[in-house]
Every structure is written in structure tokens, then in C-alpha cells.
Image: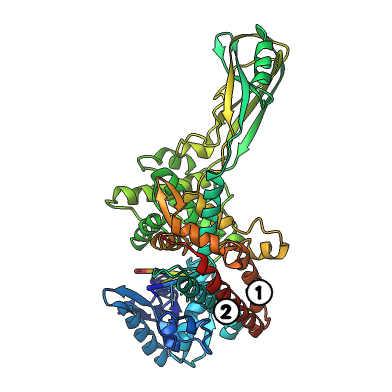
DNA sequence: GCAAGGTC
């Protein structure tokens, strides 16, 4: 019997379906000489400190550097503290029984570093010695699965990938557990002051932005506006320059004449391509903007839709699909021709040439972009419907035509130079789906400008002096923070570190919502209207750690670079020694630094 | 009591 193990039930079932296996058992599916089972993400985790004899939280234990890491069943929190997750324990027993019977194991966990780790932790925890092969596919269409099975790889091909994954896991444990205890103990508070490679740079970003915002000194500047009139159609033009003093602006205002001369008119069309399909992060950002949902709420709603088989896999970091999935898109679009809001646009798209901007197999990583499955939704709650519509609507947008705008710039002379600019949508294209206003539009912009020609003289009907103030960068909200986490590391000076982080940022799509919740739970940050602001505790922690590497995105960049080297065969030992050295250093530093902390 | 990673 060959046993196939997937990362999650949905994938296990999908593969079983392709094989034509249909005998459903508890925790697996049988048929055609195969057995298909699955994990639920990570079933095992690195054991807690007490499993290595580090009891309690004690300075004497620090730094905790286990000789050999142990694995433990994933825990859940109950009123009696942390206990083994019963569902996980049961699934592990099922997997063990199947592995015992197996002649061969085929690993079908997600094609990536963590997918490899999920399987290997199970395999080693169960002390399994059976040979295994690796299925390596990045989409779960029938064709991709069949093709993958014709090209199974030897399991050992991925030994170095496992090494890099295991190093990632151990390093996060060593730095996180030790730094957390060191700061918590030295601060003298009895509360947990957690630190980690991802959460601490995130906290630092929120604090930096908050302080920047709070300490921002607005600069006043002045502009002059005029209102020319073209045959009764009045529009607005603004002085070409900004002025530092009221006097300068007043002088310009005084020089405005009864008429203004059109010096030049420039009208050029601009193509605006449709947005890409959604990945988890972009959907969380949009749901936060449109509906005020938190990242965590959106993920939960989306998970429900996924479990109801209404949308594809949610925790994806790719905004693209491959050609195999693209082949199914026309059929999907057709299912929306009677949708209340999008029916008309879906009908227009049916049979039309589809935009291929979101089609790029090379940019599909473990999973492709989020799409509706085509199953008909039934009695969704308002919130579920809202998320579903964002996904369905985005699909229609993504495959729609470009939006064509005409951007007009008029330069006028009336004493000095004035500029009027306007944008007119000529062909809505993808913008017809939601009919949203263009959020980039500035206050001074005219929706439409009258037709004028160079050399024309227009009467000036009104003029005004405008007093304005420079504005600070806004505080983070969930949408802008998620974006910042994705792009974290883009400003790192070191070319190699920046390169190592370019496709990842801080954290992963699957973990960012939970991480924001952790910062809230620790009382490091709070929600203030839609914004995320640091608390006093958060700021105190920030002040202690801000100049240490643990508060910088560069740490992740440095690790990613080394982990990639390990994946291509570099020494594991050397990296592990460096991590131990770093753990000793940061622990010692925090044991001292924490003493100066003031926590109310 | 603690990390980051994955998922029901």
C-alpha cells in the first residue's frame, strides 16, 4: 500500500479525487491501491523549555540552549493550561497506523520550506524509516497533480530544504524564548514581555511611525487659486509654486489680472491596467479599507468560505494563476452573469478576450491567487457575502480591459503661472466592476476640464489665498501595516540582505494576522479608531530594544540569506553556532537593559 | 507565562 500525505485535508481529498479513490475513512481516503491522508498544518512543534529541564522562568537557566531539540504535539489552551490538541493527537495516530502499513510514502505537503518541515517532523516524531518520495506541484488542478505523480522526486532531494526549515524553526525558538524570558525577568514586572524575530520589528515599525507622527512639526505654506470661466464652465487652477510666507502669496494674488492666458494645454490618454487578483494580504487590506475588518476577522471569514468550498485556498502569498487555472476562468466568469452587482460586467466579459496580467505560472508559489470556486453561495451572512464579493469582483476586474483615462494639464498665465489638472475616465474597463472613486485623486483636481486652446484668454471670476500645512505620514492601520510587513526590507542598504528578503518581507501571509493579535494581547499596541498605536508598555519595550538587531527587519534578511545557502548545501553547523552566539549576546544584553525599564 | 510556522 502506498500512502500519500498532504498538508491539509482539502489537498488530500483533491488528490484522492484525481486517483478516483472514494472510500472515506476517519482521517483518510482509500482506493485504487492507495491511501490518502493529511496533516492540519504543523502537528508538531519544538518542545517547550521545561521539556529540556528548564523549569520556571529563571535567570539561572538563561540562555537556554538545548543540546538536542525535541518535538511535541501541538498544544491548545484550556482552563487547565496547555494540553495536547486532541484532534491532532488522533490524526497522528491515524498517520502512524497508515505509515506502519505502508510500502512507500509519497509526500504531498505544500511545495515549500514549511511544507517539508510539516512532513519531516511527523516522520521523525513517529520514528518512521520507510522510504518516501516527494510530490512537488504548485497548483492542484487534475493536470498538475497527474503530471506531478509522473515526476515524483526522491525524498532525499529535499534533505537540504528540511535542514534550512529546521534551522529556521530552532533559531526562532532560541532567540524568541531566551529574549522573552531575559526581558521579562529583568524588567521586574510579572507580565510577559515577548520578543521575536518578526513581532519585535513589527512593534518597532508601529512605534517609530507613531513617534514620527506625534513629533511632526507641520510647516505652513501658501498657495493662490484662481477660477477661470470658459463659456460659463468654471474650473480651478492653482499657483505653480508653493510659498513659504503669506506676503509672497499675497503679492502673487495681487498680480492676478482680470483675464488669464492659456499658455499650453496637454491632454494625454493613460492606460490603467486592472489590479492583480487577490492574495491573502491584499484582500485583508481591501477588507480593512472597505469594511473596517481586522486582518484576523478577514482570515476567519475567508477560512469559513474555503471550508464551504466557495473560494480557493486562502493563505496564499501569490496574486497570480498558472495557465491551467486560467483555462477555467471563462467558465467561472459565466457563473456570475446573474449576480446582483456584477452580472452586467460578467456578461460583458463572457466571450471577450481576457486580460492576462494575473496569469504567470512563474509567480505562483505554494498556492495561486484567491478565486471563487464557482460553487453557488447559499445564505451567506452579510460579512461573508462582503468578502465573497470582494473576491468575485476582483476576479472580474483582473481579467477585464484596461481603464483609459485622459489626463489634462492646462497652464495659464495671469500675473504668474497657474496649473489646472483634470482626469476624465474615457473607457471604464475594469473600473466598471465596483464603480469606485479613484482614491488617488487630490482635492484640487477637477473631474473634467472644459475644452480650451492655447492662446485663449479667459475671464477670472474669483481668486483666493490658500493657507495649507504639511502633513506627517499617517499612523499605521491594519491595511497599511500589512502592506509595510510585505515590503519590509525593501529599504535595507545591504544588497544581499535586501535580495534575500525581497519575496518574503516580515512574517508570512498565514501568520501576520495572528502576529498583530499577539501584539494586542501583550498590550504592546491598541486599536484607536482604525489606527494601531503603541501603548506605554509597547513604547517602553521599544526603547529598550530599538537599537538591537532583534528589532530590525535586517535580522530576517540575514537569516533568509543563510537559510537559502543551507538549502543549496552549505553547512548547518556554522549557522547554528552563529545563532547560539547571537542568543547568548542578546540574552546578556537584555538582562542588563531591561533593568532600566519603567513599566506602569 | 514565552517564538514563528502551519491549519481546523
Q: Which circle marks residue A201 in the picture?
A: none
Q: Quadrant of the C terminus of chain A?
A: bottom left
As drawn, is A434 to the left or to the right of A150? Answer: left
Q: Quadrant of the N terminus of chain A?
A: bottom left
**Label 1: which residue?**
A562
Q: Are marks 1 and 2 in contact (CB under 8 Å)?
A: yes
Dot 1: element: helix
Q: Between residues A405 and A135, which one lies in front from this camera angle? A: A405
- Which subunit holds the residue at mark 2? A
Number of other residues with Cα within 10 Å of mark 2, as a class: few under 14, some 14 to 19, many 20 or more: many
Residue ID at (35%, 63%): A307
Tell me which numbered mark, 1 or 2, is placed earlier along the sequence.
2
Q: Position of residue A244 (x, y in %)?
A: 67, 27
Above or below: residue A431 compared with residue A26: above
Above or below: residue A170 compared with residue A211: below
Q: Position of residue A423 (x, y in %)?
A: 58, 28
**Label 2: which residue?**
A167
Q: Is residue A278 visible?
A: no
Q: Is residue A258 visible?
A: yes
Amino acid at each position: 500500500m502506498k500512502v500519500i500525505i498532504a498538508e491539509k485535508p482539502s489537498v488530500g481529498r483533491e488528490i484522492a479525487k484525481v486517483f478516483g479513490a472514494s472510500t472515506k475513512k476517519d482521517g483518510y481516503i482509500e482506493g485504487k491501491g492507495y491511501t490518502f491522508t493529511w496533516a492540519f498544518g504543523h502537528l508538531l512543534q519544538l518542545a517547550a523549555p521545561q521539556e529540556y529541564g528548564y523549569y520556571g522562568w529563571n535567570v539561572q537557566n538563561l540562555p537556554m540552549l538545548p543540546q538536542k531539540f525535541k518535538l511535541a504535539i501541538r498544544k491548545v489552551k484550556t482552563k487547565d493550561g496547555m494540553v495536547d490538541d486532541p484532534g491532532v493527537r488522533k490524526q497522528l495516530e491515524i498517520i502512524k497506523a497508515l505509515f506502519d502499513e505502508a510500502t512507500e510514502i509519497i509526500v504531498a505537503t505544500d511545495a515549500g520550506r514549511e511544507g517539508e518541515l510539516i512532513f519531516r517532523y511527523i516522520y521523525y516524531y513517529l520514528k518512521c524509516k520507510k522510504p518516501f518520495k516527494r510530490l512537488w506541484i504548485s497548483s492542484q488542478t487534475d493536470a498538475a497533480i497527474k503530471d506531478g505523480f509522473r515526476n515524483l522526486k526522491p525524498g532525499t532531494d529535499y534533505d537540504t530544504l528540511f535542514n534550512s526549515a529546521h534551522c529556521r524553526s530552532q533559531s526562532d525558538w532560541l532567540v524568541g524564548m531566551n529574549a522573552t524570558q531575559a526581558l521579562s525577568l529583568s524588567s521586574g514586572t510579572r507580565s510577559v514581555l515577548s520578543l521575536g524575530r518578526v513581532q519585535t520589528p513589527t512593534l518597532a515599525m508601529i512605534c517609530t511611525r507613531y513617534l514620527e507622527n506625534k513629533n511632526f512639526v507641520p510647516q505652513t505654506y501658501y498657495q493662490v487659486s484662481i477660477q477661470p470661466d470658459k463659456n460659463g464652465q468654471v474650473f480651478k487652477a492653482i499657483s505653480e509654486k508653493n510659498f513659504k510666507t503669506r506676503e509672497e502669496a499675497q503679492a502673487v494674488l495681487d498680480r492676478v489680472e482680470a483675464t488669464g492666458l492659456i499658455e499650453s494645454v496637454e491632454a494625454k490618454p493613460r492606460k490603467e491596467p486592472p489590479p492583480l487578483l487577490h492574495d491573502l494580504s491584499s484582500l485583508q487590506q481591501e477588507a480593512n479599507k472597505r469594511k473596517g475588518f481586522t486582518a484576523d476577522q478577514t482570515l476567519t471569514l475567508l477560512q469559513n468560505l474555503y471550508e464551504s468550498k466557495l473560494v480557493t485556498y486562502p493563505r496564499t502569498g501569490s496574486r497570480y494563476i498558472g495557465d491551467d487555472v486560467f483555462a477555467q476562468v471563462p467558465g467561472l466568469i459565466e457563473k456570475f452573469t446573474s449576480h446582483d452587482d456584477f452580472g452586467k460586467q460578467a456578461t460583458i466579459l463572457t466571450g471577450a478576450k481576457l486580460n492576462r496580467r494575473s496569469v504567470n505560472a512563474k509567480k505562483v508559489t505554494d498556492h495561486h491567487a484567491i478565486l471563487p470556486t464557482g460553487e453557488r453561495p447559499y445564505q451567506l451572512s452579510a460579512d461573508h457575502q462582503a468578502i465573497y464579493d470582494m473576491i468575485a469582483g476582483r476576479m472580474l476586474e483582473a481579467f477585464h480591459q484596461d481603464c483609459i483615462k485622459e489626463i489634462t494639464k492646462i497652464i495659464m498665465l495671469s500675473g504668474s503661472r497657474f496649473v489646472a489638472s483634470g482626469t476624465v475616465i474615457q473607457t471604464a474597463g475594469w473600473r466598471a466592476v465596483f464603480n469606485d472613486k479613484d482614491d488617488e485623486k487630490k482635492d484640487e483636481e477637477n473631474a473634467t476640464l472644459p475644452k480650451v486652446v492655447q492662446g485663449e484668454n479667459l475671464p477670472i471670476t474669483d481668486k483666493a489665498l490658500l493657507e495649507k500645512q504639511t502633513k506627517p505620514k499617517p499612523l499605521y492601520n491594519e491595511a497599511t501595516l500589512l502592506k509595510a510587513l510585505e515590503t519590509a526590507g525593501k529599504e535595507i542598504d545591504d544588497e544581499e540582505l535586501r535580495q534575500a528578503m525581497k519575496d518574503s518581507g516580515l512574517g508570512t501571509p498565514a501568520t501576520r494576522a495572528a502576529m498583530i493579535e499577539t501584539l494586542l494581547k501583550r498590550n504592546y499596541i491598541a486599536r484607536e479608531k482604525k489606527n494601531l498605536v503603541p501603548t506605554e508598555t509597547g513604547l517602553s519595550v521599544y526603547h529598550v530594544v530599538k537599537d538591537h538587531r532583534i528589532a530590525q527587519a535586517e535580522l530576517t534578511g540575514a537569516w533568509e540569506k543563510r537559510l537559502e545557502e543551507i538549502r543549496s548545501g552549505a553547512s548547518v553547523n556554522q549557522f547554528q553556532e552563529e545563532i547560539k552566539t547571537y542568543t547568548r549576546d542578546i540574552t546578556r544584553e537584555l538582562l542588563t537593559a531591561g533593568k532600566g525599564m519603567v513599566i506602569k
